Amino acid sequence: MSALIKTITVDDIYVSILSARRKLDAEGNGDWVPVVKQFPPTGSVIMDALGRVLMQTRYWEAAEIAAQLEVDVRDLGGAMRILTGTQTKDFVAAYRLRQAQEWLRCTDLDLLEIARRCGQQFSETLINRFRRDLKTTPITYRRKHRPENFRELYRWK
């Protein structure tokens, strides 16, 4: 039996940290293409608002996000369980982990700066999250996923 309410994932609301990507032709020449800083509407006012908050802030805590959305934290939690199948904190953690992965793949920022841009005060927190959720370290992830010519492919702020 299929669900009547589509489960919304991080992929549905994730907005890239990049400002532009280089689109290369067969000869390796190319132009910079701006990265669109919005996601297609999910069909949920709540998730669209959450996506904007996550894109524009570094919040991790459900209470901070609920305050930004001007809703009760328990109401947000209930909506998140219905719409995503997860708790608010787990969804936010997955979103921030996705950001960290993109920072690692596309930039040469150090781990502490990436952690801070993802709302963490310490790089150890990010390292622990990588180990727990991805079974690797951020440095190993970067070595495996960042192209050598990343500076020629991505722009970011």
Image (cartoon, helix red, strand yellow):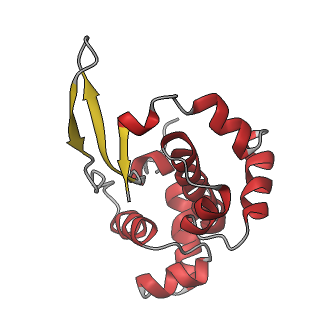
Q: Give the left or right position of residue 65, taking residue 113 as reference.
A: left
Residue 41 x, y percent position in the rendering: 28, 55
Residue found farthest to the top: 26
Q: Is residue 73 above or below residue 111?
A: below
Residue 57 vs residue 153, the one in the foreground: 153
Residue 66 x, y percent position in the rendering: 51, 82
Give me the residue at 62% from left, 77% from top.
61
Q: Is residue 118 above or below residue 42?
A: below
Residue 7 x, y percent position in the rendering: 48, 49
Q: Is residue 95 above or below residue 26?
A: below
Give me the residue at 65% from left, 29% from top.
144
Give me the residue at 79% from left, 39% from top.
135
Q: Give the left or right position of residue 115, taking residue 70 as reference.
A: right
Q: Quadrant of residue 50?
A: bottom left
Residue 135 visible in image:
yes
Residue 5 vs residue 114, the one in the foreground: 114
Residue 34 x, y percent position in the rendering: 22, 46
Residue 72 vs residue 3, the one in the foreground: 72
Quadrant containing the C terminus is bottom left
Give me the residue at 63% from left, 55% from top.
110
Residue 9 visible in image:
no
* Count of marks placed on residues: 0
